[in-house]
Amino acid sequence: MKEFKMNRAKKPAIWRLLVDRKNFFISPQFQRHFILYVMSITLVSLALFYISQQYFFHQFYQSGEQLGLPSGHPYFQLLKDQQGGLSKIFFITSSLIACFILFSALFFSHRIAGPLYRLEQYFKNASHDPSLLERPLAFREDDFFQELPDSINLFMYQHKLNKPAEEPPMVSREEDTQKKNSKAS
C-alpha cells in the first residue's frame, strides 16, 4: 500500500497547517481572541436563524388556532413533524458550518499571526545581533502581508542596513499597484 506523500511546495496551505504542523498557535493570545470573535459572530447568527425558524412555526400554530382547528387536527401534527425535521437539519448543518468556520478562523489567524511573529523575531534577534539585519526579511509564501518584507527590505537597503543579492528596484506605490492590476487581468 502506497503511503500518501506530497511535496511540501505542492501541499495545500490548510493541509500544512492542520496535518503537518504541531503548533497551531503562533500567537496564542491573538489567535484565541480572533477565533473567539469569529465564533461568537457565527453562534449569534445561527441562534438568530434558529429563533426565526421557531417564530415562523409559532405563527403557523397561531394561524391554526385562529381558524378554530382542534388541537389533535392533522394540521398541527404536520407542523410538529415539519418543525422537528427542520430542527434536526438545522442543528446538523449548523454544526458543520460552525466546524468549517472554526477551522477557517484558525487557518486565517495563523496566516495573520505568522508574519507578525516572524517580523517580531527578526527585529528581536537583530537587537541582540545587528549583523542579522544584513539578511533580508522574508515571510512564508502563503502568508498574508507579503508586501511588508519588500518595504522593510527596501528601507533597510536604502539605509545600508542589509545587503540583498541585487539592488532592489525603486518602484513607487502607484507603479506597484499598476503591475499587480495588470497581472490580475
Image: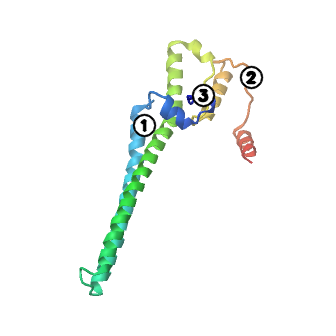
Crowding at dot 3, Cα within 10 Å, few <14 / some 14-19 / many 20+, comes out as: few
Q: Disc 3 and disc 1: Cα gap in Å?
A: 24 Å
What type is the residue that disc 3 sits on? Arg
Observer-nearest residue: 20 or 45? 20
Q: Disc 2 and disc 3: Cα gap in Å?
A: 30 Å
Residue 156, image x and y in percent?
A: 63, 23
Q: For mark 1, what is the residue?
A: 31
Residue occupying the point 60% across, 30% down: 6
Question: Which of the two discs, 2 and 1, sits closer to the camera?
Answer: 1
Residue occupying the point 64% across, 25% down: 153
Residue 149, image x and y in percent?
A: 61, 29
Crowding at dot 2, Cα within 10 Å, few <14 / some 14-19 / many 20+, comes out as: few
Residue 113 - label: none
CB under 8 Å between discs 2 and 3: no
Residue 63, image x and y in percent?
A: 32, 82
Residue 12, image x and y in percent?
A: 58, 36
Residue 167 - label: 2
Q: Is residue 170 visible?
A: yes
Q: For mark 3, what is the residue?
A: 8
Q: Which residue lies furthest to the left in this view?
A: 71
Q: In which quarter of the image is residue 132?
A: top right
Q: Residue furthest front?
A: 1
Number of callouts: 3
